[in-house]
Amino acid sequence: MWYRNRYLFILDTAICLLIFPLVLFLRLDRPDILPHAWNDFLPLIIPIVFLKLLVFTLFGFYRRAWYYLSLSDLFPLFYAVIVASFAVALFTLIINNTIPTYASNWFPRSYFILDGLLSLIFIGGSRVMVRVVFERTDSERTANRPTNAGRKRVIIVGAGDAGIIVAREILRSRRQYELAGFVDYNERKKGQRILGRPVLGVHAYLPEAIRRYRVDEVIIAIPNAPGTVVRRVLEMCKAEGIPTKTVPGVNELIEGRVSLKEVRDVQITDLLRRVQVMQDTEAIASFLSGATVMITGAGGSIGSELCRKIAAFSPSRLVLFGRGENSIFTIEQEMRRLFPHIPLIPVIGDIRDTLKVDWVIGQYQPEVIFHTAAHKHVPLMEQNAEEVINVNVLGTKNLAEAAVRHGVKRFVAISTDKAVNPVNVMGGSKRLAELIIQDLARSNTSTSFVAVRFGNVLGSRGSVVPLLKEQIAQGGPVTITHPDITRYFMTIPEAASLVIQAGAMGEGGEIFVLDMGEPVKIVDLAKDLIRLSGFEVGEDIAIEFTGLRPGEKMYEELLTHRETLGHTRHQKIFVAPPSEPIPHNRLELYLQELEDLARRFDRVTLRKRLLEIVGQADAPAQLPSPSPVSHERETENG
């Protein structure tokens, strides 16, 4: 409230009282005129001062914490002074026209200009002095505190907005850190002083600065820095034996949450930092806001993140469909805490259960379905091929056909880079699921079907990063199948954001391909994790190569010929060229054949036939003929 700044209110009153005679003195400097003018205008001083203080109050002057004065606070001060000057001019005009006494004693026009300038100088200057006095008092107070023997001497990498915020926190608290200075990638900043601390040099100077200033820790304060920058700083600090911490990403900076509390150890996601995903929120809101949205596999890594991000667009309700009761319970409890206003419908079910899927979609009538439920573990699925067919292929078909029957408007299926030129059962099953989606998109117009294809996500269950972390925690060795094996990686929030964006863009039948950046060698990822855990590669934690596992590729592809990718209106989403369709009747025969093989647990034949079918999907005329069993069934059915 205003009374918290009552001393500033009193100061402003005094300034306004002083400005009135000062302006008259500056404007009417003739000794013979000034006494008469003073006697004429003296009765107006109180209403003029009151009017100016009223304007300042309306502009929130006495609700602001002026000891945290920034440039943005000066703009409302400037506007308030202008408005106050206009208000005074209007007031004197009314007085001049209504009270005969003042009809011949009109204020000089220059009075209002001088009044505004002096008000800006004195009022603005008082606020600056508040900030100066506060910082000086705060500095003296913290300087007189007993020295903390555990306080660390630090250098901040990055002299931008985030670095200044962290530096200000350090200088204010002085409990945990002592700031030696900055290094920055902008060479022009070298030699400048920020908050009284020097910019010591560019990033290449960091090792020498660490030694010269006896630095105990380095804080990376560049939220939008690419992973290569973070990795380079980490390597320099590692060579000097200095721990490294970082501030969070761009979102936290925007939300004002970059402070000492958010300074944390460097994580693997920092080394793979990718540009922040920009969303077309208007397009997304147009198909999610007020809609009933169903997410299959809602308890999984991608499914649960989709739940969080979709909820931000205020759907009318969310149907959380999944097979694992614990994972569905967990995401339900989290969603009820984070989004208590959004109705949730948790459903335990299996996408292979035709009756259950049909009942759920018919009962809750979702307008949008995000289909993430799938088996994903490549070597494990090589040994359980029948399960991959039942879930990834037939389960997708079952869910998609139910969506058509009940008039679902949009169906977004999650695919994988392993579906490109597949050599394993999991990849083959996801490619066949894409073909099913495209076949349904061609045969009906009521439901818009799209698939979104991307690579690995960091931290997802069953992915390489949690496995490597577990091996490091156990003291090693870290096992990798091959020194040259590479994979594409993105974070779970980024993947979920782009999936939603692609869903908003789809018109029907597209396969969207997400920009995964550059592929990463798994051995480099393992080395980074070992170093981040405080160990030395080869000395503390060994790396062993075990050979490629069944169904594992040396590298993944996002498209057979990447240069044929089509652009979309989003820079990180591409659209794959459509393949020649498999005739619907023949596709049905293949699915029936694979289902029969799965029921007989003929895993060898099942794997062979699956890869044959999808391997020639782009040349339907040369597709393998259905097996004799399937052909006989076709003949019997006429």
Image: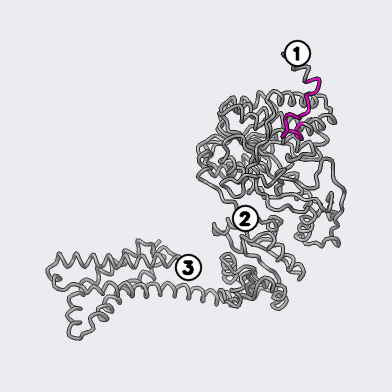
Q: Residue at x 78, y 24 (%)?
A: 626
Disc nearer the start of the sequence (3/2): 3
Residue 263 falls in which quadrant of the image?
A: bottom right
Q: Residue at x 36, y 69 (%)?
A: 9
**Residue underneath mark 2:** 275
Q: Secondary structure at mark 3?
A: loop
**Front residue of this view, candidates 229 and 565:** 565
Instruction: Report x, y in % for residue 250.
Output: 59, 57
Q: Is residue 357 above or below residue 107?
A: above
Q: Is residue 210 above or below residue 581?
A: below
Disc nearer the start of the sequence (3/1): 3
Instruction: Report x, y in % for residue 635.
Output: 75, 15
Using the rendered image of the protein, determine whether residue 344 is visible from the camera's viewpoint: no
Q: Quadrant of the N terminus?
A: bottom left
**Residue underneath mark 3:** 70
**Front residue of this view, candidates 306 and 61:** 306
Q: Quadrant of the C terminus?
A: top right
Q: Secondary structure at mark 2?
A: loop
**Residue underneath mark 1:** 636
**Front residue of this view, candidates 13 and 592:** 592
Residue type of the residue flagged with mark 1: Glu
Residue 559 forms part of the magenta stretch = no
| Camera-side mark, 3 or 2 | 2
Q: Is residue 356 above or below residue 423?
A: above
Q: Which residues are magenta?
A: 613-630
